[in-house]
Amino acid sequence: MRTELNISLSPKQASDEFFYKPVVAEKLRVDESRIRLINVRRKSIDARQRNIRINMAVEVFIDELPEQQTIEFHYQMVDQKPPVAIVGAGPAGLFAALRLIELGFKPLVFERGKNVSERKRDIARIHREHIVDPDSNYGFGEGGAGTFSDGKLYTRSKKRGNIRKILEVLYANGAREDILIDAHPHIGTNMLPRIITNIRGTIQQTGGEIHFNSRVVDLVIQDDTCNGLVLENGDIVYAEAVILATGHSARDIYELLYARGITLEAKSFAVGVRAEHPQALIDSIQYKRPERGPYLPAASYSFVEQVEQRGVYSFCMCPGGMIVPAATAPGEMVVNGMSPTQRNSPYANSGIVVEVRPEDLHEFRQMGVFAGLEFQRKIERLCFALNGGTQYAPSQRLADFVRNKFSQDLPASSYHPGLISSPLHEKLPKGIRFRLQQGLAQMDRKAHGFLTNEAIVAGVESRTSSPVRIPRNEETFEHVKISRLYPCGEGAGYAGGIVSSAMDGERCAEMFAERYRKSHQ
């Protein structure tokens, strides 16, 4: 007999089947020996009260075992199938490639950066020597920005695709089974490179192609139809369609499209700082106890405030994580966050950012659709100048920042290149600085102790999303003016994160396949 059950447990009870099996047996009023299998389907933490509970949804098999179910993905040999070019090997591009293979098309993936192994060496140079390779960094290279990130898999985009399938693919390629049951799953930066390498293997073994160090510099467009692309080395690649999955930091792609007269739109984005606290402090605030104990994970937080009609919110919160240098070109200072699978760093960090709308950018209105890009560039160059032209992060103690006080010294930090004390309260644009200060004060009222000089803010967190959208027809997913050109993922302005980008990549592949088959009937 199979049955489903929702149970509320203590952290210790939820930590191992040895502890929760007796609870399940008691709830179902059966002898424990009759329970053959318990599958945990969902798990979440309820820390609203001091008595913390773990809510679990379980599938229980009594007196029998389930039939073995093997997850299968129907990847076929596609080496002789119609080719589709994909620009970018991030989550959107890789999952578009996998879906094309399932649908009987040959993906040709062109990635400006390097494979994971070589990319690791370039990232190490950023930390050690402060040298940023514009094609190989935390933003560019195999797997995109997601490869060296926390690997958070939570998304609110429930209607855009099959979330479960994305998680199953990641699990099949090496992610832990936890991602299939946790309410807010994550993979961890230490595991992501291997998973991305495994996905590459699937694409290549089935006849698809992935080309690294292959920057796209133009598109082949005739009669408002995209028939291929041009590489930096002069090679022209013809294909049945082009899926643009370049990520939100590929500014040269926006400039290329604009130069070709391809429609772009300005959109809202966010800019701010990355805040870092001792993880133990966040644990004590969120769990309402001096220590979290052995059975609870590193605590996270999520804030959404309103200051002068603009949102101020936490972004990409990384419990037990570290701050990393995320510039994608020399002369920039950008920070981001990530954490390993165990989330065992002594620090917790999160972007604290302010919503920026196109109408806010009066100073850059002459830049038209690129006003947001220019605003990003200006603030990134400013922070680069503050740190003396290195990858030291301009920083300030958090309470000092809110109180407009220069920090004479800084606490220890996870940021490996190093911090430099800077007057961010003076240098950040007034509208950003004031809203950050007010928003942080509001956050402290909800989580008393959050506003402290034990924490720092580091600048600048400017790559939360793209300030530019590549508009597409929502019925066909093609660009609104250019057929067979499929803007996709974060870079196109239609996703935000690994899962939503992966789902968007799959949907673009499906929409292309549908159009192709209709045109060849």
Image: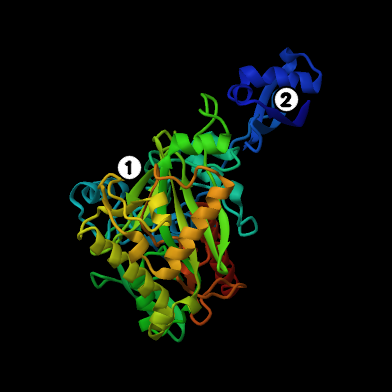
Q: Position of residue 483 (x, y in %)?
A: 50, 78
Q: Position of residue 477 (x, y in %)?
A: 56, 71
Residue closer to the observer: 128 or 485: 128
Residue closer to the observer: 454 or 297: 454
Q: Position of residue 278 (x, y in %)?
A: 41, 38
Position of 127 compared to 100: left or right?
A: left
Q: Is residue 379 visible?
A: yes
Dot 2 falls on a residue whose secondary structure is strand
Q: Which mark is residue 413?
A: 1
Q: Are marks 1 and 2 in contact (CB under 8 Å)?
A: no
| Residue drawn at 50 percent across, 73 percent down | 357
Q: Looking at the picture, which amino acid does disc 1 mark? A: Ser
Q: Earlier in the sequence, mark 1 or mark 2?
A: 2
Position of 230 compared to 182: left or right?
A: left
| Snapshot quadrant of residue 208 | bottom left
| Snapshot quadrant of residue 214 | bottom left
| Residue drawn at 44 percent across, 59 percent down | 93
Residue marked by disc 2: 61
Vertical relation: 84 (above or below) 323 = below
